[in-house]
Image (tube, grey):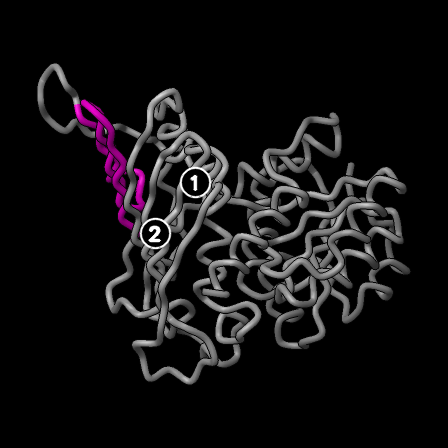
Amino acid sequence: MMNILVIGLGSMGKRRIRLILELDRGYTLIGVDKRDDRRKEVSDLFGILCFETINDASLAIQIDAAFVCTTPVSHGNIITDCLERHWNVFSELNLVSDGYEKNIRMAKENQCVLFLSSSFLYRGEIQYINGRVDLSRRWNYIYHIGQYLPDWHPWESYKDFFIGQKRTNGPREILALELPWIEWVFGDIKKIGAISDKLTGLEIEYHDNYIIQLIHENGTKGVLLVDVVSPVAVRRFECYTENRYIRWEGTPDTLFEYDPAEKSLEQIEIKEQEHQRGYQAFVVENAYEKEIVEFFDVVLYGNKASYSFEQDRKILDLIDSIEAY
């Protein structure tokens, strides 16, 4: 039995609660959010107790683990609070490295699990691509990820969502999601270059599109086009080398690989197509469930996590370098 506190009851917090309940492991869930409307909604939807503060929740029930699902700039202090209470922590993407050194050290000292979400590492398509990319060879890849910023969460203004803020902006979130799997598949990035500017009339204080050149340790070269401009949501990936070619457009049914014997593209079947209403088709729920399961396996059985705060600190440094161009 495990008592789990979900901190932040917005769209991601509700997703995590639903998925944990669907695992049907008998865990007790408790919610925390400062907003009355969110606490009421979650209580009505899932039948769980909700509190206004972490301290109120901790006085009511003994907590074993916490899911930090608040806005990224608040993660550092909340994680510190949880670790001081000797709770295991699952954190959504941080986008900034506030408190990393302290929290990494505290987790070790208090023998707590400090787990960081990186959902694309759990996608069946990404895992297939990783298994097919042989790093004894050099590859080229082109990857465009874009969607008009107001369409990310159409139920709220982008000005009220963290992607509208400079420190946690939309392109930064895209890069924080994508760069971990790109390094996993193609190896460490040794050189970067970027150009960027602003194409939209959106009320934001950051560049809304980037063209990024990446060179990996083995000589593989990549180009990323990252934007919050495209009126059509797009995720389009191609990689190739001699007699090899893979194409993916962000959903389980759009993965294709070149068959050199047949000289044709063959569709690769990936049986992961669960999708949550209200999100674009390339937002697949299975990956979110898999990383929750991995977190529990790390906590309960000491398994190794696929991604760490130490790895993420390197990724955030890369993103800082890209934004500095």
- The amino acid at mark 2 is Leu
Label 2 packing within 10 angstroms: few (<14), some (14-19), many (20+): many
Label 1 packing within 10 angstroms: few (<14), some (14-19), many (20+): some
Q: Position of residue 227 (x, y in %)?
A: 35, 64
Labels 2 and 1 touching (C-beta < 8 A): yes
Regarding mark 1 in the picture, which secondary structure is present there? helix
Between residue 139 and residue 100, name the one nearer to us.
139
Query: Is 131 inside the magenta-drawn segment?
Result: no
| Residue segment shown in magenta | 235-258
Vertical order, 204 against 172 (above or below): below
The residue singled out by tag 2 in the image is 224
Q: Residue at x 36, y 34 (%)?
A: 220
The residue singled out by tag 1 in the image is 182
Vertical order, 134 against 206 (above or below): above
Regarding mark 2 in the picture, which secondary structure is present there? strand
Vertical order, 99 against 264 (above or below): below
